Image (tube, rainbow, N blue to C red):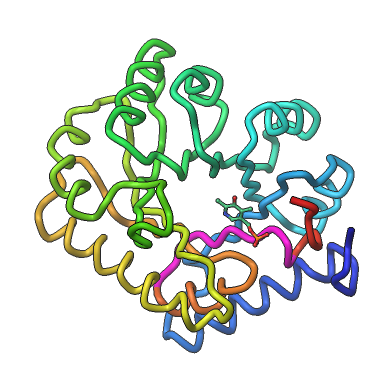
Amino acid sequence: MDTEPGTIAARVRTVLDEIHRAAIRAGRAPDAIQLVAVSKTVCVERLREAVDAGIRHVGENRLQEALLKIESLGRDGVVWHFIGALQRRKVKSVVGRFETIHSVDSLALAEEIDRRAQDAGLRQRVLLEVNLGGEIRKNGFEPAALLAALPALNGLESLDVHGLMAIPPPSSTAEEARPYFRRLRELGQTLTAHGCGNINMQELSMGMSHDYQVAVEEGATYVRVGTAIFGARND
Ligand SMILES: *Cc1c(COP(=O)(O)O)cnc(C)c1O
């Protein structure tokens, strides 16, 4: 199903334009924000259209589907992101195949990624997923737990922690997500102020199709956009 008007190329241009405008509104450099096109359920041909239209960062949250797409599109000019819930037994297949894992939601998962990265002789770039929704969402570190986990995370030498990711609770308007985006940014600043050692909190992965402009205004460095580029999914 594809209800949005325009071609994929036109929608990519629209989203890039909106990101640019939101950055300018917030006094930010537009090139500080990377658009990650989220292509779950989207076939390779349509994803290729997006890449031809200038998409460089692609996000997938289903491992098998992602691996098939990586095989057909390759890595030349495409940077792959893993953004979905990750089971520990699947870590081995993810490490080294994605530039960044956005969804590290527990210390145990971080440790497993570190172990597998070390086995493979590489370093894995990750973001830490934070649960800002309390009871509403279950995935992610609680902010206080994250602070407590910092020393342990710091000891993981094959893990490059570059920032935070969050998915706010579902809301009907983009403005309702703003306080969550703001809290994620402030959490990054708090963690930095506590001294994170090797951990860096430079990246904020936040904002999806319905609220990415607000996320950019609040400091997002990655926005993860699916529907606004590829049309509605059936999931
Ligand atoms: C599906 C998904 C997105 C994109 O959602 P849209 O509303 O289609 O833009 C972003 N982030 C994650 C983690 C997702 O699973």
231 horizontally vs 77: left or right: right
226 is within the stretch colored magenta: yes
The residue sitting at the front extreme is 135
Image position of 207 (left or right of 163): right
Task: Please provide the residue range marked out in magenta.
Answer: 219-228
- Where does the N terminus fall, quadrant-wise? bottom right
Q: Residue at x 40, y 71 (%)?
A: 219
Judge by depth and name the residue closer to the eye, 163 or 55. Answer: 163
Residue 181 place in picture, x, y as percent: 39, 70
Judge left or right: residue 51 versus residue 101. right
Q: Residue at x 81, y 62 (%)?
A: 231
Question: Where is residue 144 shown, x and y percent of the image?
Answer: 17, 53
Name above or below for residue 34 compared with residue 67. Answer: below
The residue at the far bottom in this view is 25
Residue occupying image coordinates x 88% and y 69%? 3
130 to 12, vertically: above or below:
above
The image position of residue 9, as x and y in percent, is 84, 64
Q: What residue do we see at 41% from left, 30% from top? A: 124
Spot occupied by residue 153 in the image (x, y as percentages of width and height): 22, 35
- In the picture as drawn, the residue positioned furthest to the left comes out as 194
Q: Tell me which corner region of the image, top left, top right, bottom left or bottom right, holds residue 205.
A: bottom left
* Figure disc tally: 0
Which corner quadrant of the figure contains ligand 1? bottom right
